[in-house]
Image: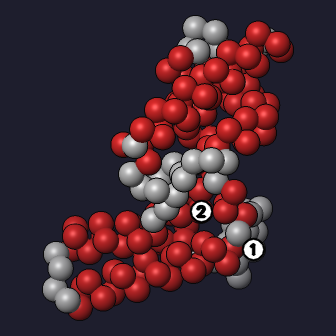
Amino acid sequence: MNNKKKNEGQTDFSYYGLYLLDYLRTNRFEQATDEAFIRERADRAAGTYERAMLEGYPAAGVQELAMRTLLEGLRYSKYAILREVVENEFADDVPEAERESFLQRLLPLVGNVFSIYDLADDNFALSPDYDLLYTELTGAVVLYIDEYGV
């Protein structure tokens, strides 16, 4: 008899579903709570894997294609970009122990800064828009710290 309880929030996702769920949660993507989105993406990745295997791709190539399908358009999260700005530009101002709570307070306040940028573009970090966003976020963090402190 199996009396194990499921962990809260645990689901019956496939390998790809669990990988995507972890990735979305870690990077604070809004889709982290959307089971239908996760299942659809996981199914597409599994389908890509199966087709590539049938076409004779090597195992490493098959997995790479499946992961590309799974994470398409999810390379850059608002949270991850803001975290990068704070870690790179404000490491001396925002102690590591306080960084997570600082980011959680700040993220909702700078959400509109992201609205004009296409974060779903997998090449976004290579574009001039990334530099503009980075600069805007740096300015927003300066203003926040000046006004409210850390």
- Residue 28 visible to an observer of this rendering: no
Residue 49 x/y as whole percent: 34, 80
Q: In this orientation, which residue lies closer to the viewer: 47 or 6?
A: 47
Q: Which residue is pictured at 67% across the width and 48% down the height?
A: 115
- The residue singled out by tag 2 in the image is 21
| Marks 2 and 1, how far apart at CA | 25 Å
Going from N to C along the chain, the mark reached first, 2 or 1, is 1
Instruction: Classify residue 116 as left or right of residue 47.
Output: right
Binning the other alpha carbons within 10 Å of mark 2 as few (below 14), some (14 to 19) or many (20 upward) gives: many
Q: How is the image coloured?
A: secondary structure
**Residue 83 is drawn in which quadrant?**
top right
Relative to residue 62, is residue 95 depicted above or below?
A: above
Residue 63 x/y as whole percent: 30, 70
Q: Which residue is pictured at 53% across the width and 17% down the height?
A: 89
- Quadrant, the N terminus: bottom right
Residue 139 x/y as whole percent: 64, 20
Camera-near label (2 vs 1) is 2
Amino acid tagged 2? Leu
Numbered label tally: 2
- Quadrant, the C terminus: top right
Amino acid tagged 1? Asn
Instruction: Classify residue 136 as left or right of residue 60.
Output: right
Residue 130 x/y as whole percent: 47, 38
Relative to residue 93, is residue 14 depicted above or below?
A: below
Q: In this orientation, which residue lies closer to the viewer: 108 or 16?
A: 108
Label 2 element class: helix
Relative to residue 100, is residue 31 depicted above or below?
A: below
Q: Which residue is pictured at 33% across the width and 87% down the height?
A: 50
Q: Which residue is pictured at 37% across the width and 66% down the height?
A: 68
- The residue singled out by tag 1 in the image is 3
Label 1 element class: loop
**Residue 60 is drawn in which quadrant?**
bottom left
